[in-house]
Image (spheres, grey):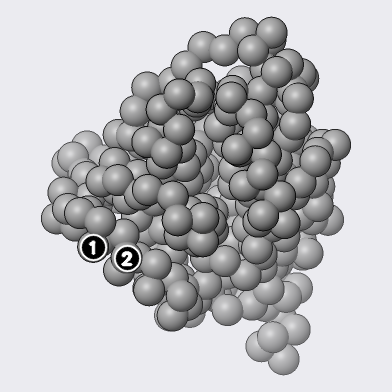
Amino acid sequence: MKAEILRLIKQYNSIIIARHKNPDLDAYGSQFGLYYSLKEKYPEKAIYAVGDTNSLNSFGEFDDVNQETYSKSLVIILDTVSKALIDPNVYKNYAKLVFIDHHNNEAEIPNDIAYQVMDSASCAEIVTELLLDWDFPINKKAARALYMGIIGDTGRFFFPSTTASTLRIASILIEKGVDIAEVHDRMYTETKRTKQIKNDFFNLVRYTDNNLAYSLNGYDFIDKYGLTSFFVSRGLVNQMAGMEEVKIWVNFTVDTETDKILCEIRSRALPVLHVAKKYCGGGHLRACGCTLDSWEDTKLVIKDLDKILEENNG
């Protein structure tokens, strides 16, 4: 399958690199890592990076690509195979479509190749391995992007998905010229205002009798600080991590664009993916999510997660 992806990259003179909406660091990192590598390897080809942007973007600018260009391009979508997480314009029209991903979901869009390494700690790790296997250049920009993707999805190598291979690949990227101090300063320093937001968030966290931690974030909390739903949902979920008594935590946040409820589920050790999948979501075994129709549905998710804890305690 690696060889087939390489064959398509060599074949097409127009390549569009995409990823999921509301990108996290792994989505950005894998996208721009591949982008900068292909740009150096094939300066004669038209290489595009497409997608939305947010405050996490320190990687580069995005291209506007028309449907005519899509129709003659190889489209590579990174860090997801979920239809709901991809801009429809990306898969509306294409010559060939390739997925590269590490989540435990089946591809929901017809494609030519779905290359999934589900035990990989990050999509950036997969992309780095591919570039190394193909002997493609990994310049300083590409290395920085890929390293940040790996750091983002492993929580600075804290998460149990981190393997010896993850550390080996990170060390190779550092050898390519990654400035660790700059990267970590960019990723982990924050303003006093952000600290206050996180403090207020933590004070709103509730607990079940089995120590399931959960937060219900409505318009009041979002509007108070002028936040985005994505920041509250994905950016604050792990404020509930690190408590000895809490083995599972879940963050519910209203999506201000759709009025649906974004649900992010995390676990220190217990599998929770089946709960996300029950509500048409997905992700990883201990880090996953879904979208709910109403606040009433949050009660069902809390009940399912609390049952896991009750059975485990028993």
Contact (Cβ within 8 Å) of mark 1 with mark 2: yes
Residue 175 image label: 1
Which residue is farthest bottom?
314
User: How many numbered discs sit on the rendered protein?
Assistant: 2
Tell me: residue 149, above or below residue 67.
below
Q: Residue at x 66, y 88 (%)?
A: 313
Distance of label 1 from label 2 (alpha carbons): 5 Å
Q: Is residue 3 above or below residue 166?
A: above
Image quadrant where one finds the N terminus? bottom right
Which numbered marker is on residue 172? 2
62, 13: nearer the viewer: 13
Residue plotted at (42% across, 38% down): 41
Classed neighbour count for the residue bearing mark 1: other residues with Cα under 10 Å, few (<14), some (14–19), many (≥20): few
- At 43% from the left edge and 64% from the top edge, which residue is drawn? 154
SS for callout 1: helix
Quadrant where the image shows the C terminus: bottom right
Question: At which x and y percent is residue 114?
Answer: 75, 49
Q: Which numbered tag is attached to residue 216?
A: none
Instruction: Return the residue nearer the eye: 80 or 44.
Output: 44
